[in-house]
Image (cartoon, rainbow, N blue to C red):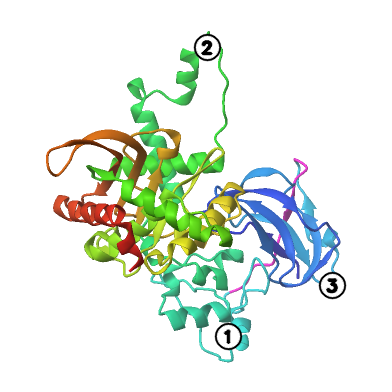
Amino acid sequence: MATEILMPALSPTMEEGTLAKWLVKEGDSVSSGDLLAEIETDKATMEFEAVDEGVVGKILVAEGTEGVKVNSPIAVLLEDGEDASAVVDASSDGSSHVAPAQPTPDTEPAKGYGREAAAADEKSAGGTAQPPSGADGKRLFATPVARRIAKDKGIDLAQIKGSGPRGRIVKADVEGFDASAVSAPTTSAAASKAAEAQKASMPSGMGSDQVAAMYADRQYEEIKLDGMRKTIAARLTEAKQTIPHFYLRRDIHLDALLKFRSQLNKQLAERGVKLSVNDFIIKASALALQEVPDANAVWAGDRILRMAASDVAVAVAIEGGLFTPVLKDAHLKSLSALSTEMKDLATRARDRKLAPHEYQGGSFAISNLGMFGIDNFDAVINPPHGSILAVGAGVKKPIVGADGELATATVMSVTLSVDHRVIDGALGSNFLRSLADNIENPIAMLA
């Protein structure tokens, strides 16, 4: 029986994507695991694999098509010997659609992309138990491997949004599952809020057409929003509207760190490692989150989740937007390991080759604009994080020494943006003090 190949959800927040490139053509035979297409999300371009075998009978969505909704049909897969003309009908407007057989109450759904065979899954898993159900009573479809991993990790499958056909939960969904993001609003909900906020911020609630009309006699270039820019607009509008930000500022002396960094880089040169100031800031932040554990937390709607590990997100600027790849267990890693990992993540972020689990999660983020000559600024919290550190440039400034004498020092200004629902003023101050102590006494970070 012909089955539909559906647009996959390649991340928990993906609602639509661009079908960048087909890796198969009509008439090709495919097996489970074969690459079918390249899908461009708001964050990355990822390869989409087949989960069943058959023949590509009809491609419904052309290469380069934008705004393809998740779970909408993009192609038809046929069984061997099946004729595509028997299941693909031309509509009046020249498009094509599939009319798959609908399951009756007395039968199991047909196997394939559009209809999952729960009984077959259970047989593959070596049991005959009924598949799990969510809180709403709906059946949860998951591969046997995904169920086993979820059971081992103690993860409730009902909390996971499957990226397989018809929302089927696969291995990658469970391995990349972030419990801290469960309560985060969906992209569609956030986008709706952003659209409402945008309209409300216009004079008299003006819409985009009305704004354009105001500048009808002026020359301008209209720039279309891509998926990444739409997501950034939605999430940051939501953040500023819903998160009660407050800001803590502090100057940190860098002279000891710069001297220590120079010594280390001479010793590490033969290994091809060159530490940056940002590497030290990442390590110092990770240790501070361990030293002030109540600050290592995220907002989860009706509760606070205090994290055990220091998973530090770092903002990376790319063309048209930014990524925040996450350095997991940063408190346990050496400076050289953090430096190497950060360079790799930044490179793949700029090429949009990061997997979702590499830029989702974390409880804390760093945004460093010092290399652009910015002395200080306030960063917007990336929900559900409890805080974000804005880092400015190290600048030579006159200071008054401990004995009252005038001197000069390299001073870096930092601003901690804090979610007041998660972190109070005294707690945030303790975190900043610990951070400053680590940076101003860098040798201690190696202990």
Dot 1 lies on which element?
helix
Q: Looking at the picture, how far across and down is residue 145, in whole percent?
A: 57, 80
Pointer 2 local density, CA inside 10 Å: few below 14, some 14–19, many at least 20: few
Q: Is residue 406 magenta?
A: no
Find residue 122 and name its label.
Answer: 1
Q: Amino acid at mark 1?
A: Glu
Q: In the rendered view of the protein, which quadrant contains the N terminus?
A: bottom right
User: From where the camera sits, is residue 376 visible?
Assistant: no
Q: Is residue 99 magenta?
A: yes
- Residue ranking furthest to the top: 217
Range shown magenta:
93-104
Could you tell me the amino acid type at mark 3? Asp
Q: Which class describes the residues within 10 Å of circle 1: few (<14), some (14-19), or many (20+)?
A: some
Q: Nearer the viewer, residue 84 or 182?
A: 182
Task: Name the kind of residue labelled 2 in the image.
Answer: Ala
Residue 335 sits in which quadrant?
Answer: bottom left
Q: Which mark is residue 216?
A: 2
Question: Cα distance, mark 1 to mark 2?
Answer: 62 Å
Q: Nearer the viewer, mark 3 or mark 2?
A: 2
For marks 1 and 2 on the same chain, the one whose residue lies earlier in the sequence: 1
Q: Quadrant of the C terminus?
A: bottom left
Q: Residue 436: horizontal and vertical position, in percent?
A: 26, 52
Q: Is residue 72 left or right of residue 56?
A: left
> Cβ–Cβ below 8 Å for labels 1 and 3?
no
Q: Which residue is mark 3?
A: 80
Q: In the drawing, does residue 45 fall left or right of residue 146?
A: right
Q: Nearer the viewer, residue 287 or 28?
A: 287
**228 vs 290: above or below:** above
Q: Position of residue 179 (x, y in %)?
A: 39, 67
> Which callout, 1 or 2, points to the residue nearer the camera?
2
Q: Name the main secondary structure of what is drawn in magenta.
A: loop
